[in-house]
Image (cartoon, helix red, strand yellow):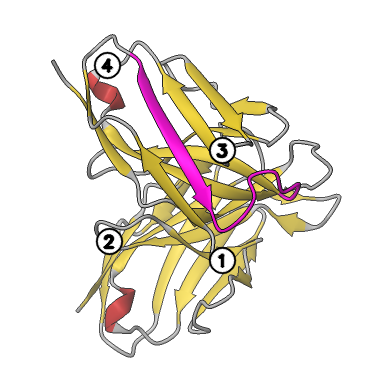
Amino acid sequence: DIVMTQSPDSLAVSLGERATINCKSSQSVLYRSDNRNYLAWYQQKPGQPPKLLIYWASTRESGVPDRFSGSGSGTDFTLTISSLQAEDVAVYYCHQYYSTPDTFGQGTKLDIK
Amino acid sequence: QLQLQESGPGLVKPSETLSLTCTVSGGSISSTSYYWGWIRQPPGKGLEWIGTIYYSGNTYYNPSLKSPVTISVDTSKNQFSLKLSSLTAADTAVYYCARRYGDSSGSGYQYYFDYWGQGTLVTVSS
């Protein structure tokens, strides 16, 4: 199984500041035949299901604010929130769908400083 | 707007079988571009993919699961279902059903989860 490791486990950022969450996979999730990274990011607020933010590592889902962006390739990926808003407090998960079984990162809890 | 709703018992005894159903509304479960899956989340922990089904009945399971799993689809009711047997306390979790974007040729290539149900808490306890 591909192991997804997120860092940090938790972080606190001031309102309006940048938040950066990292995700590292134990093997590459870049599929060479289509040059796409098989990686997604989700946001989960307490008592709610996960919400898709980013897929193919950097494509923003429709309706997701443009302060959310994804980057990276191969084994190292980053989710960036350019200017933290109060409603962004949540747990964030990365997800690889390159190979079966799908696996998720352990989650990063984001709070306001 | 697509909606998914899980239904089933909230409490199941150890060694018994869990049966959950996901009802899809606002869209057809027979769409060729989507797969339908189950994911679970133990209290306070992360996400675990259980398995996925295509409208044709093709199934894909997580081989790492310890409990036997069966996923089925009923296109006439726009529903798909999960059966998890030989339950233990480790199967206590919130169970989510979700739609999964995938290859429309039915090749089995599956991608990200774009719509999720609200989840249902299942507790395994005597």
Q: Which residue is mark 3?
A: B77
* Disc 3/disc 4 C-alpha distance (Å): 30 Å
The chain ID associated with circle 3 is B
Please report whichever mark, 1 or 2, sits nearer to the chain's N-terminal start: 2
As rendered, which of A81 and B30 lies closer to the eye? B30
State yes or no: residue B31 in magenta.
Answer: yes
Q: Earlier in the sequence, mark 3 or mark 4?
A: 3
Q: Chain of mark 4?
A: B
- Badge 3 density bin: few <14, some 14–19, many ≥20, Cα 10 Å: few
Q: Are marks 3 and 4 in contact (CB under 8 Å)?
A: no
Q: Please give the residue where the numbered disc 1 appears in the rendered image.
A: A54
Q: Which residue is mark 4?
A: B88
What element does badge 1 sit on?
strand
Residue A10 is tagged as 2
Crowdedness of circle 1 by 10 Å Cα count: few (<14), some, many (20+)? Answer: many
Task: Chain letter for mark 2, please.
Answer: A
Q: Amino acid at mark 2?
A: Ser
Residue at 56% x, 31% y is: A1
Residue found at the far bottom of this picture: A16
Q: Considering the numbered disc 4 on the image, is that residue within a helix, a strand or a loop?
A: loop
Residue A35: x %, y % from top left:
80, 57
